[in-house]
Image (cartoon, helix red, strand yellow):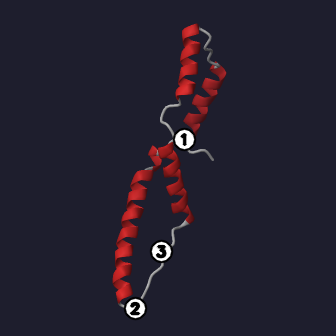
Amino acid sequence: MKITDVQGLEVEQLQAKQTEKVSKTQGQQVQEKAGGESDVIQLSPQSRLMAKASEVAYQAPEVRSDKVAAVQDSVAQGTYQVDSRKVANKLISEMIQEK
């Protein structure tokens, strides 16, 4: 699965909430350890996946300049061609998925 739009996933907000929960829990752990008890924090596989997705998203460039340059060159030279059948199929599939 390729993640292309992480803004819709609200990764930053989720990560901030998780960090806040961990910080609060760690503060409670210190207090509880003083009382003789200890807690263990285990992150779910989903939270690890979201953290990894966030890390990858922040490392990736927003614009793939090599692709942009190639398309600009094709347009400038008049050789850029659009496959109207592919565009139509993509539009229809996107409209079907939204419903």
The percent position of residue 37, horizontal first and vertical second, equals 42, 89
Q: Residue at x 53, y 54 (%)?
A: 52
Q: Which amino acid lies under the numbered mark 1 shown in the image of this protein?
A: Thr
Q: Which amino acid lies under the numbered mark 3 shown in the image of this protein?
A: Ile
Q: Is residue 21 left or right of residue 81?
A: left
The percent position of residue 39, horizontal first and vertical second, equals 45, 81
Q: Residue at x 51, y 56 (%)?
A: 50
The image quarter in which residue 35 lies: bottom left
Q: Is residue 32 visible?
A: yes
> Looking at the image, which is closer to me, 39 or 86?
39
**43 over 71 or under it: above or below:** below
Q: Secondary structure at mark 1?
A: loop
List the residue tagged with mark 2: 36
Q: Secondary structure at mark 3?
A: loop
**22 over 91 or under it: above or below:** below
List the residue tagged with mark 3: 41
Which is closer to the viewer, label 2 or label 3? 2
Q: Residue at x 58, y 37 (%)?
A: 96
Q: Residue at x 33, y 83 (%)?
A: 31
Q: Which amino acid lies under the numbered mark 2 shown in the image of this protein?
A: Gly
Which is closer to the viewer, label 1 or label 3? 3
List the residue tagged with mark 1: 4
- The alpha-carbon separation of the residues under discs 2 and 3 comes to 17 Å
